Structure formats: structure tokens, C-alpha cells
Image: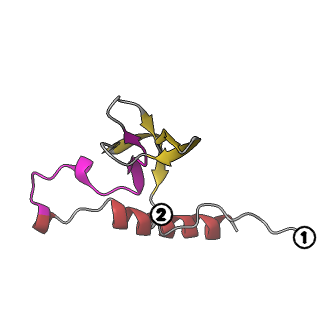
Amino acid sequence: MGQKTSSMARKVSQSVSSMFGSTNDSETGPGFSSALAITPFVYTKKGSRFYDEDGDLAHEFYEEKDIGGHTVMEQHWRNLTPEGEVKLPIPRLHMDFPVVICEAPYSS
């Protein structure tokens, strides 16, 4: 049982390391740094918030307008700047990572 588990783990780790960490010297050349290798981790993401002209950061902005004696909140879309790339506090695994990390036992 222990040998089967370790051999399975070895096969998985070899396939993952060959996919994400191997380098082909004929394409990259001798000066290739291993730090540039593709990793299964994601360190940044595209931000979903916007900055307005005052420098406030939010998902949505609203303006209060007075229409015929009624106060109405209207969504504001002008002069907004996207947040850009946001650094993640904890690296995540890429969604196309080809290995099941943990399989929980099924109990009924």
C-alpha cells in the first residue's frame, strides 16, 4: 500500500513538474533563469473596482438627483478609472491546474 501511494505521488509530481517547471535548453538557451518558468500559482488578478474623480474606490457609484420633487439615486458611469492589477495576499492555484488536490470522503 505504501509503495503504491508513493509511486502514484511520484507520477503526479513528475507530470506536474514537467508541465510547469521544465525548461527546454534548445529553445531558451543557456542563459535562461528558472525563475521565469511557468508556475501553477496566480499572484495577481484584475481588479473589479473603479476610482472616481475624488479618488474614492468602489464597485459602483451613485448620484443623488432631484426629479419632480422626488429624490432618485442614479448610477454614475462618467470619469471612472479601472483599479488595474491587484496583488493577492495569498497565492492561488491556477484554475487549469490538472491535479485533484484533495478528494473528500463521501458520507451519507
In this rendering, the answer to whether 19 lies above or below 59 is below
- Looking at the figure, which quarter contains the N terminus? bottom right
Give me the disc on residue 3: none
| Range of magenta residues | 28-51
**Residue to which mark 2 is pinned:** 95
Q: In the image as oriented, which residue stretches furthest toward the right?
A: 108
Question: Residue 98: x percent and y percent?
Answer: 48, 69
Asked if residue 49 lies in the magenta stretch, the reply is yes
Q: For the residue marked with disc 1, what is the amino acid?
A: Ser
In this rendering, the answer to whether 14 lies above or below 57 is below
Relative placement, left or right, of 104 versus 98 is: right
Residue at the spot 35% in from the left edge and 29% down from the top edge = 55
Q: 7 or 34, which lies in front?
A: 34
Residue at the spot 63% in from the left edge and 71% down from the top edge = 4
Q: 14 or 54, which lies in front?
A: 54
Q: Secondary structure at mark 2?
A: loop
**Residue to which mark 1 is pinned:** 108
Q: Secondary structure at mark 1?
A: loop
Question: Residue 69: x percent and y percent?
Answer: 57, 41
Question: Residue 14: x percent and y percent?
Answer: 42, 66
Residue at the spot 42% in from the left edge and 65% down from the top edge = 16
Question: Residue 38: x percent and y percent?
Answer: 30, 57
Q: Earlier in the sequence, mark 2 or mark 1?
A: 2
Q: For the residue marked with disc 2, what is the amino acid?
A: Met
